[in-house]
């Protein structure tokens, strides 16, 4: 029913015990068997709710392995997977770890991670640079770009990149210009977009009109958009979200996701739910459409990207 095919399931929260969020109390114990079981249950629940697009990465701990196991039992050709390369998970599922992932945008890392991720074929349709930046030089690295072009040609993949940080739109624009042997390389862009950071809106329509895929991440600004006391400067936005949630008979999370679906031509908007309850609540975004007046009012709650990303940097892994 509705727009379920526009919602994808992001696996960051179910592949490793810690991820960026607003939780106050980090858990101190970890049961590998129970965690794995919970992850599989979440995949099954997402599927039962109608989700057919799954976003994963080697940097998300056991997420790729979990997905592969689940897919082999599922046997549904309609399931589409996007994964990434460029981050190695190093925390070994230690709930007290302080170092979680190591970034490396070299061709050797690409080849090493591709050797593992290719097991997700034929479900694997989208292969993305995990958090492309100017600093790593990845968008000028000829070896990396040629190898990605080869994979695109050989496996018919959508080659993509994800971006994070105050200059994410500049990185995205640079990605749009990258060509190998005269052919544009990137056709999928996983970008942060939400009520507070709407920078993508200026270029999103044009990118979608070129037939490229926009995949929206962090639709809830890692939880900051949902009513909470830690961010009193967002209280007006929070109050309005509560009002809309009552009006549409859903939670504020569904309003936040729906805002992304209705205000930008997104191919998919990712739910990063960590629990079945959140997944069910998030999916309510597929069952209604925001009125124009609500979209316009929500647009007014955008904050300058500098402020948004300074706050984002201060969030903890919990
Ligand atoms: N490429 C990248 O660098 C990158 C970066 C970030 C994310 N991503 C992808 O995007 C996906 C989604 O992003 P995200 O999960 O990080 O960000 P998000 O959607 O902005 O935030 C999810 C947060 O919202 C909270 N939440 C969701 N539904 C809720 C509900 N019904 N009630 C209360 N709280 C609720 C969660 O809280 P709890 O934590 O308490 O559950 C979580 O902290 C990820 O899974 C990943 O696949 C990619």
Image: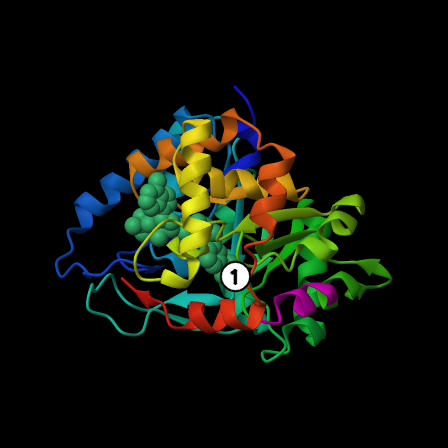
Quadrant in which the C terminus appears: bottom left
Residue 36 x, y percent position in the rendering = 25, 44
Predominant SS along the magenta part: helix
Residue 176 visible, this angle: yes
Camera-side residue of 79 and 314: 314
Q: Residue farthest to the right?
A: 182
Residue 48 x, y percent position in the rendering = 40, 24
Residue 124 x, y percent position in the rendering = 55, 43
Mark 1 Cβ and ligand 1 under 8 Å apart: no
Q: Residues within 10 Å of mark 1 (few under 14, many from 20)?
A: many
Write down the residue under mark 1.
85
Magenta stretch: residue 172 in it? Answer: yes
Q: Residue farthest to the left?
A: 29
Local SS, label 1: strand
- Colour scheme in use: rainbow
Camera-side residue of 157 and 137: 137
Residue 268 visible, this angle: no
Q: Is residue 121 above or below residue 289?
A: below
Residue at 48 percent across and 43 percent down: it is: 256
Q: Which residues are magenta?
A: 166-173
Residue at 25 percent across and 40 percent down: it is: 38
Magenta stretch: residue 296 in it? Answer: no
Q: Is residue 177 above or below residue 270?
A: below
Asked whether, in this view, residue 3 is left or right of residue 36, the answer is right
Count of marks overlaid on the render: 1
- Figure quadrant of residue 185: bottom right
Residue at 47 percent across and 74 percent down: it is: 310
- Figure quadrant of residue 274: top left
Camera-side residue of 166 and 103: 166
- Figure quadrant of residue 60: bottom left
Residue at 48 percent across and 38 percent down: it is: 255
């Amino acid at each position: 029913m509705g727009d379920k095919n526009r919602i994808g399931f992001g696996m960051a929260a179910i592949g490793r015990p810690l991820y960026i969020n607003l939780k106050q109390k980090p858990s101190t114990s970890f049961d590998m068997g129970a965690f794995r079981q919970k992850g599989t249950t979440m995949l099954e629940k997402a599927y039962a709710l109608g989700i057919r697009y799954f976003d994963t990465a080697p940097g998300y701990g056991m997420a790729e392995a979990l997905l592969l196991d689940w897919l082999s039992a599922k046997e549904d050709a309609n399931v589409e997977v996007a994964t990434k390369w460029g981050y190695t998970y190093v925390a070994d599922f230690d709930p007290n770890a302080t170092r979680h992932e190591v970034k490396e945008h070299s061709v050797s890392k690409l080849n090493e991670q591709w050797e593992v991720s290719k097991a997700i074929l034929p479900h694997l349709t989208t292969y993305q640079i995990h958090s492309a930046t100017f600093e790593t030089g990845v968008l000028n690295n000829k070896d990396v770009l040629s190898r990605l072009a080869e994979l695109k040609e050989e496996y018919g993949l959508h080659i993509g990149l994800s971006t994070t940080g105050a200059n994410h739109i500049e990185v995205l624009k640079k990605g749009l210009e990258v060509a190998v042997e005269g052919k544009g390389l990137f056709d999928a862009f996983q970008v942060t977009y939400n009520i507070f950071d709407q920078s993508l809106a200026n270029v999103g329509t044009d990118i979608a009109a070129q037939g490229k895929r926009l995949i929206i991440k962090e639709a809830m600004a890692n939880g900051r958009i949902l009513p909470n006391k830690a961010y009193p400067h967002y209280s007006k936005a929070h109050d309005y979200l509560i009002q809309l949630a009552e009006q549409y008979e859903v939670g504020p999370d569904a309003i936040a996701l729906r805002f992304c679906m209705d205000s930008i031509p997104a191919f998919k908007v990712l739910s990063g739910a960590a629990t079945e309850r959140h997944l069910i609540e998030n999916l309510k975004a597929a069952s209604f459409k925001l009125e124009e007046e609500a979209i316009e009012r929500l647009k007014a709650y955008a904050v300058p990207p500098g402020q948004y990303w300074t706050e984002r940097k201060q969030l903890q892994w919990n």
